[in-house]
Image: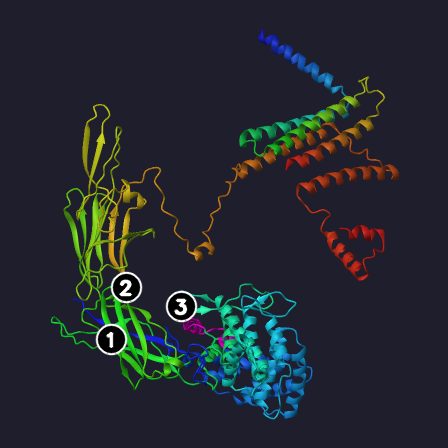
Amino acid sequence: MARSTTKDAQALFHSLRSAYSATPTNLKIIDLYVIFAVLTAIIQVGYMAIVGSFPFNSFLSGVLSCVGTAVLAVCLRIQVNKENKEFKDLPPERAFADFVLCNLVLHLVIINFMG
Amino acid sequence: MAVAQFYSNLHWTFQLIPVGMARSPGGFLVLVLILTISIHKAASILDSHQPVALELFSPVHGSFGSLEESYDALQTFQILGIEKKPDISDTTCTLVSKTLGSSSSSLKDLFYALKVNGILKCDIDEEVFEGIKSRLQSVSNDASSLLDFYYSIGSLALIKEQASKVDVLLTDADGIFQSIKALSQSDGRWRYSSNNPESSTYAAGVAFEALARVVALASPEIDQSRVKFEFYANLFCRLSICSASIHQGLDFTGWLFQISTLGNDIVKLFDSIEKYDDGAFYFDEKIVDAREHHGPLSTTASVVRGLTAFADVTSGSLNIPGDKILGLAKFFLSVGIPGDAKDFFNQVYSLACLESNRQGFNPTDFITTSNSAFIDQKRPTQDHDIFVLYECNQVRVNTVLGSNAPPLTVKLLQAFSSSSKNAFIIENQELKFDPENAVHFLDALPENVDVGNYVFVFEILLHDPEHEKIYATGSRTRVPIIITGVIKVDTAEIVILDSDLGSVETKRKLDLAGENDVSLSANHLQKLRLSFQLATPLGHAFKPHQAFLKLKHETKVEHVFVVGSSGKDFAIVLAVVTMVLTWDLMLAMDISILHGGLGAKLTVTGFGSENGSKHTFEVILKLGVPLLDAFPLGVMDADFLGLVEKFFYLSGRYDIQLTVGDAVMENSFLQALGHVELDLPEPPEKAPRPPPQPVDSYLRYGPKAEIAHIFRAPEKLPPEQLSLAFLGLTILPLIVFLIGLLRLGVNLKNFPTSVVPATFAILFHLGLAAVLLLYVLFWWKAPFPPRLSISQVEICLRKRQMTGNIPTSPWEAAVGHF
């Protein structure tokens, strides 16, 4: 049964991949940005695990900036996605502007909190 | 071996004060001669007072200041015999003539100007005197206050003395006399004016002087003997019917009657006299006058002046007891040398009054002796070849101000020890007179006179019985004399004993005349014993006034003990307590300390309650307290912790110091004997701490110790390479992101090219960049606004200053606020 599992996994992976390639480019950009943010967060957590949590506020601000910007990017993706019926009337420029503004506010807080 | 020497030099001071010599054989003024004994080191008052007078009355720019001060100074100089400087005379005479010539001078200024003129004898015209005379006469008739009377009448009296051609006569002498007398009070004091109810003794003195001047001015041609006759005639008249022939004299006898009643006032005033223990009398003000307070010296001086003036003009007997006059003289002499100019003048002038008679200052006798008490006497003894040289006790007799005495004999009536008043060592011995030095001296002291405190009683006998009326000698005078000598100190030794057995552990002989430095050690189970013997030069036992043993720890904590004595032997035993006795069933305790040189036995009797039996404990007192005078028997405080607690359980090195002293001992000593190392047990929890020693004030306010700050240890940071590695690792996802973007074929060419959208696009991106730049600047703590604009701000500010802070444009106003 292991072979079938692997075959299933491979089949699953291929189907995912083909479906994903159908997504529009702008959504892929956003996904890439999210992955970048999350990776940065993970690296920071790893660093803290090695050297200790002093100063804690700096660690928090670093991690939360990554997580926050990732969350905002996800929100942007939701709003921009044409297949999403909920945000049909929302122009994508408006969503992007929201994204930018919220990021600026987030980073204002982060810069202040970092110490 | 100590050398026995007696030193004796006795000098005493007696003063004879003649108070007024009567012109007529009948009638004294006051008792005349006074013998006082006081202590003066100088030969006479004149010698001791002269330099001080020159210092106190030093002229400033050729004059003494006001006329009153000038008079004080000049009169003092005249009494003490100091020569006046000519330039002072010139300036003072100028002031005097100016004051006398001016019609607006006050009465007081006129009075003092005339007094100064009397001493300096300035050249004043007769017309000036005439002018003043008429003014003064009118004032004296209309005056109402005592001081006005005093100044005006005094000035008139002085004019009469100084200007012989001017005829001064008081027209209404009787009325003036009455007015002044009306201000008197029943207790002998005087009021200053009828409005003011306050009375003072000082005013009484002033009044006496004024009244004396009135009498002097009223009828100068009246003979003194006639005065007396009239007085008795008046008395006779009152007893029987008077005939007309005596009527003529009645006016004057009425006048005389008033003078005699004034005598009663004086006697009443003397009732308020105050006294010191040594026999000095003085007057003092009862009510302190805030306006012008007169202390005892100036009050007494005023009264003496008044009395002298009054005694000079009348010859009625004032009947003041001799001891009062003697006491007044003693008071003035006991002041010593006053430091204030006015006090100095009062003292010297009063003494001169007491000494002088109407003819001036006749020299009279002084007896001066000074009371130091060394007996200088070396006797040949069998042991030593030392010769006795007996130096005389000198007694000199003078008057108050230092003149020679009339022929007299000084007799030493008694001399006895102050402790035993009955045993006289000398009785009725006359002192021999040495005419060269004008001193009386005592030939020889008897052989058996030992050191100690004695009292010598002297009496003065005048050779000429006539002098008895003139000079007053006091009654017997007692002088305390201390005869000192060298005390022999013998057989001094210091011993450490074992308290249990009483055996001697360490013994050191001491030489209390020389240097000592013993070094002992003891623990709390041992005792220290110091003993020595004291003997007078004649061999008797001697108990000094002070005998102390001091133990001083190295931390400066000191303990002082009194050394007790029994007969000749002095001993002090110090023992240190270790035991604490406790008992439960103790109902009665009987403690007796036995005599004994080296220890004390404590007998404790306890009663047991169960069987009623008596238990006797005999405990050798390992702990002791210093045994005081003569080892008294009796109950002593059973403080068993004794000296250990007294010493605060401080072990260590204690310096020993012995002090023995007395007034009769010439060789009193304070000696450091060495040190003893004391080993005391550990202090218990609640032991008393030694008292804090006085802190050296320089240490208190000096710099304190340097403080070493302890800083918080810096946090452990990870090594720099690790941090940098992770920094690089963080950049990695960004690179991944960018590469992914390229892989996705992101369209970067969609930038708008037409103008308006391009502008907005650029502005949008610039805005974003600006916000991010702000964050970065904040993060880097970079100054905001950036430094480039600060110089612009300074230029603007200077411009504002120059133009008077008026901003020329809103921009400048805005910038200027930076």
Q: Amino acid at mark 2?
A: Ser
Q: Residue at x 51, y 74 (%)?
A: B263
Q: Which chain hosts label 2?
A: B
Residue corresponding to mark 3: B279
Q: Earlier in the sequence, mark 1 or mark 2?
A: 2
Q: Amino acid at mark 3?
A: Gly
Magenta-span inclusion, residue B328: yes
- x%, y% of residue B745? 75, 29
Q: Which chain hosts label 1?
A: B
Q: Secondary structure at mark 1?
A: strand
Residue interval drawn in magenta: B320-346
Residue corresponding to mark 2: B418
- B684 and B809: which is toward the camera: B684
Relative placement, left or right, of B86 versus B620 is right
User: Tag on residue B429?
Assistant: 1
- x%, y% of residue B467? 37, 83
Q: Which chain hosts label 3?
A: B
Q: What is the quadrant of residue A68 in the picture?
A: top right
Q: In the rendered structure, are the residues bearing label 1 and label 2 in contact, judged by CB atoms less than 8 Å apart?
A: no
Q: Is residue B727 above or below residue A18?
A: below
Relative placement, left or right, of B378 versus A66 is left
Magenta-span inclusion, residue B768: no
> What is the distance, in whole Å, between disc 3 and disc 1 at their CAs?
25 Å
Q: Earlier in the sequence, mark 3 or mark 2?
A: 3
- x%, y% of residue B45? 41, 79
- x%, y% of residue B768? 77, 37
Is residue B292 shown to the viewer in this render?
yes
